Amino acid sequence: MSRVLVAMSGGVDSAVAAALLVEAGHDVTGVHLKLADVPDDQQVPGHGCCSLDDASDARRAAQVLDVPFYVWDLSTVFAREVQDPFAREYATGRTPNPCVSCNEKVKYAALLDRARAVGFDALATGHHVRLRTPDGRPVTRPGGPARLHRAVDERKDQSYVLWMATPDQLARSLFPVGWLTKDEVRTRAEVFGLRVATKPDSHDICFVPDGDTAGYLGRHLPVVRGEIVDVSGEVLGQHDGIWHYTVGQRRGLGLDHHERRFVVEVDATSNTVVVGPRDALAVDTIGVDEPSWTTGAWPDGDGLTVQFRAHGRPRPARLERHGSRGVVIRLDESVHGVARGQSAVAYDGGRCLGGGRITSVRRQPVPVG
């Protein structure tokens, strides 16, 4: 029997993860993390993941399962490691993924360190991913080598946000719901008598529960006006801050142009937003600094794919070493809308090999007529 700390968000996935581990005979303790310190008047029911209702739902689930339960206030750490960098990244023209940062700095890696420091054998979460042994068997006990794989329900797969997991961390992790479809998770919740069985999933950034990212950034970043420039060099308009824009954006540009325009580049150095036709978004080479590999070693083999969004389509690619701590990703076919700051995650079939944050892109030249 293993002592397992289960991160219980208040949602159905983490509640069922705890229930499955209790059923399997583990010594389970639940913990709810208070992360985003969102004022009551800005909370939106059913959105975000850090409301008082979420904490109450997590506590009720622990009571039903008859396991110890605690609330840990990590809002200061969360603000320093996730919220503040989120605003800074936008201010420098990059497109951050706060869910990746949260798993890397708080909700997964850091929480696992805390769990082990106080005597737990493993951390379990409700992430939709699977762990397999090197010979392909499901991991049911912590301590041995484990390989990170996509979830059974690929529509809910969350391996993209766990690319930073190290071999040692995976050996001390359990992800029970990754072997179930979402419908099966809800059915199991009903069987276990958990009230969150029908609770909707949260899709918003937890500290922006109303979904208004520009509004959130506007409260944290100054207005610094600059030019919106076409790839041809023509000045098309003005902006009130580059943080209003991200690569691939089409709506809300406020331009009077005879052709549809997309954001192609956000240049913090010149405080300029560059726009152009969709073809100008095509990228065939991507640079990543200091990648992390889930096996601890550079991935070998052909037929690898790379994914650039949480639920994006995997793209065939070749990985090449660049210097001592970098990787160049060469795509077999160009992709559109890839931005600096996003994560590039490599896969071998359904196995997540690791990844890193994009630091550079090479866009294909577009004829200017």
Image (cartoon, helix red, strand yellow):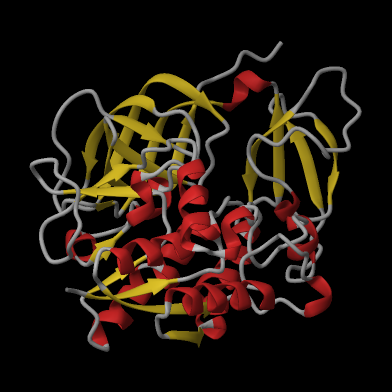
Residue 249 shown left or right of residue 58 in the figure: right
- Image point (11%, 56%), residue name: 145
* Quarter of image, res 274: top right
Image spot of residue 357 (x, y percent):
41, 50
* Quarter of image, res 141: bottom left
Is any part of residue 87 visible from this angle?
yes
Residue 343 shown left or right of residue 143 in the figure: right
Vertical comparison of 270 with 196: above or below: above
User: Which is more toward the observer, 60 or 285?
Assistant: 60
User: Which is more toward the observer, 13 or 170?
Assistant: 13
Residue 189 shown left or right of residue 128 in the figure: right
- Image point (25%, 33%), residue name: 319
Vertical comparison of 233 with 108: above or below: above
- Image point (46%, 44%), residue name: 184
- Image point (21%, 47%), residue name: 323
User: Which is more toward the observer, 16 or 33?
Assistant: 16
Image spot of residue 7 (x, y percent):
43, 71
Image spot of residue 279 (x, y percent):
61, 18
Is any part of residue 310 visible from this angle?
no
Residue 341 shown left or right of residue 224 in the figure: left
Image spot of residue 367 (x, y percent):
62, 13
Vertical comparison of 212 with 350: above or below: below
Q: Residue furthest right?
A: 256
